[in-house]
Image (cartoon, helix red, strand yellow):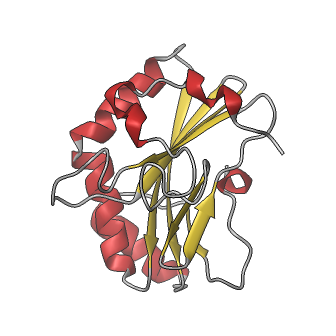
């Protein structure tokens, strides 16, 4: 397994203190260097050798106010491709999860600042992805209605409960 030592090459400016370093460091959302966990829902993005990734806590760190925001983001780079991935870990209220992702992506200046820093680094192609990790599954029609209502595209709603393997976002890129 890759040890993550080269991840420090990704610069996110003043938000570097919000990068997961280990379990509960800098925030209880961190379940290790590349994993988020909240109320039994988990998601990871495990880089392989030669790749770089950061797990960044948004709720309570990058954005410490009471306005709407999603839980976290992953920044991921392999060869000349980059991804910025917003993540919301949610029980069953998927309407609120879509709202949180949309507000973060569209209205949050902190997200825009990190996006700009990450996209300007070597000017590589950058893909944005949004994911919800939930213990609720919805039909495609309802998923599409929520996307249209909030004017975003959510790549996947991943199912996560204690008895299932932790979804690795790398497999969905």
> Where residue 144 sits in the image (x, y, percent)?
44, 72
Q: Quadrant of the N terminus?
A: top right
Above or below residue 173? Residue 143 is: below
Above or below residue 163? Residue 113 is: above
Residue reaching furthest to the left: 66
> Where residue 156 sits in the image (x, y, percent)?
57, 66
Comparing 160 with 60, the one in front is 60
The image quarter containing residue 14 is top left
The image quarter containing residue 83 is top right
Residue at 35% across, 50% down = 58
Residue at 67% across, 26% down = 6
Left or right: where does residue 167 sit relative to residue 69? right
Residue at 31% across, 48% down = 61
Comparing 79 with 59, the one in front is 59
Left or right: where does residue 102 sit relative to residue 68? right
> Where residue 29 sits in the image (x, y, percent)?
46, 61
Comparing 56 with 100, the one in front is 56
- Total numbered labels placed on residues in the image: 0
Residue at 16% across, 58% down = 67
Left or right: where does residue 83 sit relative to residue 98? right
> Where residue 122 sits in the image (x, y, percent)?
54, 13
Above or below residue 100? Residue 61 is: above
């Amino acid at each position: 397994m890759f040890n993550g030592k080269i991840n420090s090459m990704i610069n996110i400016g003043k938000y570097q203190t919000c990068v997961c370093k280990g379990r509960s460091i800098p925030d209880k959302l961190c379940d290790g260097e590349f994993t988020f966990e909240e109320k039994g829902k988990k998601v990871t993005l495990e880089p392989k050798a030669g790749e770089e990734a950061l797990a960044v806590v948004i709720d309570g760190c990058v954005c410490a106010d009471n306005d709407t925001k999603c839980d976290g983001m992953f920044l991921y780079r392999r060869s000349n491709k980059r991804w910025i991935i917003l993540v919301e870990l949610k029980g069953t209220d998927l309407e609120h999860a879509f709202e949180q992702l949309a507000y973060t992506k569209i209205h949050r200046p902190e997200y825009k600042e990190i996006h700009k820093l990450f996209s300007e680094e070597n000017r590589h192609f950058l893909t944005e992805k949004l994911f919800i990790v939930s213990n609720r599954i919805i039909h495609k029609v309802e998923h599409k209605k929520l996307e249209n209502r909030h004017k975003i595209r959510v790549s996947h709603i991943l199912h996560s409960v204690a008895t299932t393997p932790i979804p690795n976002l790398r497999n969905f890129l």
